[in-house]
Amino acid sequence: MVMNNIGLIGSLFLTFCAVPELIRTIKNKKCHLGWGFLLMWLFGEVFCFFYGFQLNEIPLIINYTFNLLVVSLMMFFKIKENLIYIKNIIMFSTHNKN
């Protein structure tokens, strides 16, 4: 029972450690994390979600679902940032041809 509680507390810390970075990302409308980190985080959470689902551990499923939401939001801002960058390059190169 004690180890279960320790595990749940550790899980909560790991879940909420991404919240400050998510707030920063939403505030700046820019994700400061690299693609490698985001993709490994995403795949890790997906695999862990299925593991928790297989074990039928509701606390794990909630934890991984929340983390999937966080990493998805951060990836949304990363993709949006990259699309704006590409658009600016295209506009700049088109503008310089005239």
Image (cartoon, rainbow, N blue to C red):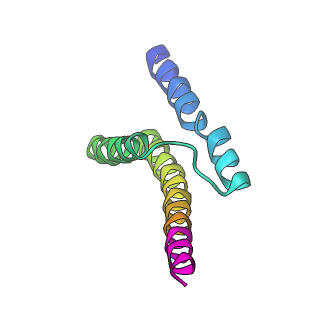
Instruction: From the viewer's side, name the closer residue of 95 and 18.
Output: 95
Residue 12, compared with residue 10, is above or below; it is: below
Residue ID at (53%, 31%):
14
How many marks do you count on the picture? 0
Residue 75, compared with residue 67, is above or below; it is: below
Instruction: From the viewer's side, name the closer residue of 95 and 17.
Output: 95
Residue ID at (45%, 22%):
4
Tell me if residue 6 is in the magenta stretch: no
Residue 52, compared with residue 78, is above or below; it is: above
- Residue extending furthest toward the bottom: 98
Side of 50 relative to 76 (left or right): left
Residue ID at (50%, 80%):
97
Q: Position of residue 21 (x, y in %)?
A: 63, 41
- Residue extending furthest toward the front: 98
Magenta stretch bounds: 87-98
Displayed quadrant of residue 57: top left
Residue 6, compared with residue 43, is above or below; it is: above
Q: Quadrant of the C terminus?
A: bottom right
Q: Position of residue 25 (x, y in %)?
A: 64, 50
Q: Position of residue 72 (x, y in %)?
A: 48, 56
Q: Main secondary structure of the magenta part?
A: helix
Instruction: From the viewer's side, name the closer residue of 88 and 29.
Output: 88
Residue ID at (29%, 40%):
55
Q: Position of residue 29 (x, y in %)?
A: 66, 57
- Residue extending furthest toward the top: 2
Tell me if residue 91 is in the magenta stretch: yes
Instruction: From the viewer's side, name the closer residue of 7 and 43.
Output: 43
